[in-house]
Image (cartoon, rainbow, N blue to C red):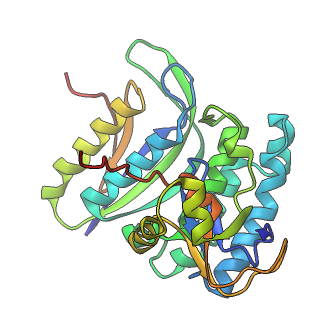
Amino acid sequence: MTTTATQTARTYTLCDGAVLDLQGLDDEQRAYLEAAYRRAWPAINEEDAGKSRRRCEWGDFFNDVVGSKGSNPLLRATQGFVTREIYDHPFFQALSDLATRLGMRQGLLKRPRGKRWLVDPFADEFAPVSEIASRKSVTVKAVHKAIDRGDLVTVTGVLDGAGPKSGLLVSARSAKAWAPKRVKAAS
Amino acid sequence: MFYVKFLVPVTDKAGQAVRSEAWDRLAGRILDVVGGFQQTRVVAGAWRSDSGQVFHEESREYVMALDSMRQVADFLALVDWAAAAFAQAAMFVEVAGIPEVLAPPG
């Protein structure tokens, strides 16, 4: 199943490829992130930097969503102070990432090589553990260990789409970012 | 408690945009040193160097709250690190309301 709608998205992929688990976000945070995405994404995809600025200017967006005098609900409780807890929060990380992509489009941040920063951050698909193990050429046990370490994002339940899938499902994008350590067999 | 702040231009002294990782490292350093910061994007600013060259630039502003004067040294070390990391000729800083455009030591 592929998810793209922000209200139901379970993951957010940062432009460096790291995958955030959004399942702990509350309703207010989800609605805020969706509004920020709807505001920034068309401007990120606007190839002309001038037109992009007219759609959604980086500085205004930055100040509003991650700035201390903006409207970010996480910063309300700290009078605008970004603490380690806030900085590492998936909600804040996702908003910062949108601001980063906008800055890249408008020439205020150096763009990385490739087009990964233009891939929809909410797009993801979920696959059973066994399928992920097969894709990564590792054992099922190795996948479970990675899940326990927090290297892979999972969901439980039944997802529809190209055929129902049930049980523990793994985010394909988090699996893509995961680099399993290869252990050399003893000779 | 008193406030300190510094401005970090969004482009280096050659006018080039910097990588987003540099901003992440800066935030990480600030959090390690003082535990928190306020951030805003400053619209625009200009300053004249000792050689008379006028620099026009957009900056991000970082404000931190310090509990003791003893932390000022850590703050200034952070500013020096940022000047090097962001390839800046000088940095605007403010300590308890006292402003200065600070050139890196040496």
Q: Nearer the viewer, residue B98 or A54?
A: A54
Picture quarter containing residue A155? Answer: bottom right
Q: Is residue B97 visible?
A: no
Picture quarter containing residue B90? Answer: top left
Q: Nearer the viewer, residue B1 or A10?
A: A10
Find the residue positioned furthest to the front: A187
Residue A154 location, x and y as percent?
Answer: 57, 75
Q: Nearer the viewer, residue B4 or B8?
A: B8
Residue B100 location, x and y as percent?
Answer: 33, 38
Q: Nearer the viewer, residue B69 or A59?
A: A59
Find the residue positioned furthest to the left: B70
Direction from residue A50 to residue B69 in the image, left or right: left
Direction from residue B10 to residue B25 in the image, left or right: left
Picture quarter containing residue A28? Answer: bottom right
Quadrant of the snapshot with the N terminus of chain A: bottom right
Find the residue positioned furthest to the top: B51
Q: Is residue A84 visible?
A: yes
A32 lies above or below A92 = below
B30 lies above or below A52 = below
Residue A153 location, x and y as percent?
Answer: 55, 70
Residue A25 location, x and y as percent?
Answer: 60, 81
Which residue is found at the position 54% from the left and 37% from the top?
Answer: B10
